[in-house]
């Protein structure tokens, strides 16, 4: 089993910044990639950003140039630096860990961007 604990969410004004953290623990050997997804009320969950074990990154179109994903392998932690936040970034943000044959999700952290 893998446990993912997200932190860093909160309320911020438009144009502001937040940094989310996702700490992984448990049977973490073999993680291929970790990512951040978000789900707004009434919307489907969507990819925000992902990072592979080799450091390759991928971003959703709506966050390119504003968000940056990074990882600290020594701390088994993935970060999401969010800049120039917009009200449409408001959502619950989830961390995900991908293995060859399974994946695990965190409990989510709420980000609210006020206009």
Image: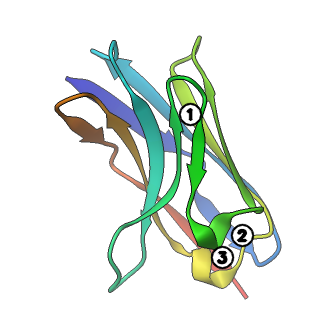
Residue shown at 33% from the left, 49% from the top: 107
- First in sequence: mark 3 or mark 1? 1
Q: Which mark is residue 78?
A: 1
Which residue, given by chain and number where applicable, does mark 2 sit on?
12
Q: Could you tell me which quadrant the C terminus lies in? A: bottom right
Please tell me whether residue 57 is drawn above or below residue 64 in the rendered image: above
Q: CA distance from mark 3 to mark 1?
A: 22 Å
SS type, badge 1: strand
Within-10-Å neighbours for mark 2: few <14, some 14–19, many 20+: some
Q: How is the image coloured?
A: rainbow
Which residue is more in the foreground, 25 or 59? 59
Residue 51 location (% of width, % of height): 54, 38
Which residue is more in the foreground, 42 or 48? 48
Within-10-Å neighbours for mark 1: few <14, some 14–19, many 20+: many
Residue shown at 28% from the left, 29% from the top: 99
Q: Are marks 2 and 3 in contact (CB under 8 Å)?
A: yes
């Amino acid at each position: 089993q893998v446990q993912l604990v997200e932190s860093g969410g909160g309320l911020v004004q438009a144009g502001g910044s937040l940094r989310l953290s996702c700490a992984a623990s448990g049977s973490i050997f073999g993680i291929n990639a970790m990512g951040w997804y978000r789900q707004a009320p009434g919307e489907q969950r969507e990819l925000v950003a992902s990072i592979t074990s080799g450091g390759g990154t991928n971003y959703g179109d709506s966050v390119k140039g504003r968000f940056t994903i990074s990882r600290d392998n020594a701390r088994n932690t993935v970060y999401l630096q969010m800049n120039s936040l917009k009200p449409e970034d408001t959502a619950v943000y989830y961390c995900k860990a991908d293995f060859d044959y399974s994946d695990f999700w965190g409990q989510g952290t709420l980000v609210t961007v006020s206009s």
